[in-house]
Image (cartoon, rainbow, N blue to C red):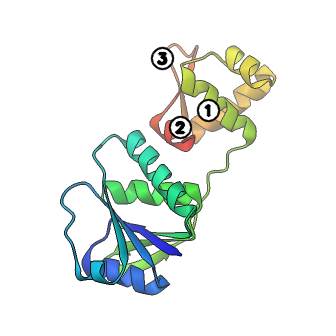
Amino acid sequence: MKILISNLKGKDLLEAIMKNNIDKIVSVYTNYNENSLLDKYLEKENIKIGTTNSIELCEALTNLIRKHKAEGDVYVATDGNFIGSMLNFTANKEGVKEIYYCFNNQIIQLPQLHLKLSKTKLKILKALNENEQTAILIAKKVGISRAMTYKHLNDLIEEGLVKQTQRYEKYYLTDAGRIAII
């Protein structure tokens, strides 16, 4: 089964459906979602998003994509609004079949991008998800040397996933870091 998860409407949605012979539409929206003629011909599921918190939204979209990946191939088509941006990111993170973006009334396929996080960096992010921690404590929890911990932390800071406290004693996750480990 080919499933399209999208926040698009109208002609743009129809074009995304036709590009891939979609069997089911999952429409994601924040406000009112109208019924359309497509409802008569395709299976449709409406998902209302009730949060403006980016982390909660990313968690909800991750769960939605994982649920539908168990049913078949998942495709995503978005625009540039809040839900569209987060859906695009989550689709990349979850490795859906194809991702489309609506730009100037054209549907274009986007290349898939991947976060390149080693197992060690992922362990560090998960450790920091608990609370702010010193490099020494992180090294103990993750089971690596302090030198390697500082190297990984510097990489994670450059990637925008981790920051240091004002006094430079502890490290903590940014919102991007929290989203990366969902």
Q: Is residue 73 left or right of residue 138?
A: left
Q: Residue at x 63, y 26 (%)?
A: 127
For the residue marked with disc 3, what is the amino acid? Gln
Mark 2 or mark 3, which is nearer to you? 2
| Looking at the image, residue 150 lies above or below residue 89 | above
Q: Are marks 1 and 2 in contact (CB under 8 Å)?
A: yes
Query: In which quadrant of the rendered image does the C terminus lie?
Result: top right
Task: Give the residue drawn at x 40%, y 81%.
Answer: 17
Q: Which mark is residue 17?
A: none
User: What amino acid does circle 2 point to?
Assistant: Gly
Q: Position of residue 159 (x, y in %)?
A: 58, 42
For disc 3, the marked residue is 166
- Give the residue number, with chain letter if any, for mark 2: 177
Nearer to the camera, 21 or 129: 21
In this rendering, position of residue 110 left or right of residue 116? left
As measured in the structure, the alpha-carbon distance from the residue carrying label 2 to the one carrying label 3 is 18 Å
Disc 3 crowd, CA 10 A, few/some/many (<14, 14-19, 20+): few
- What x and y, as percent, mark residue 56? 39, 40
Quadrant housing residue 22: bottom left
First along the sequence among labels 1 and 2: 1
Is label 1 in a helix, a strand or a loop?
helix
Residue occupying the point 45% across, 85% down: 19
Q: Is residue 79 visible?
A: no
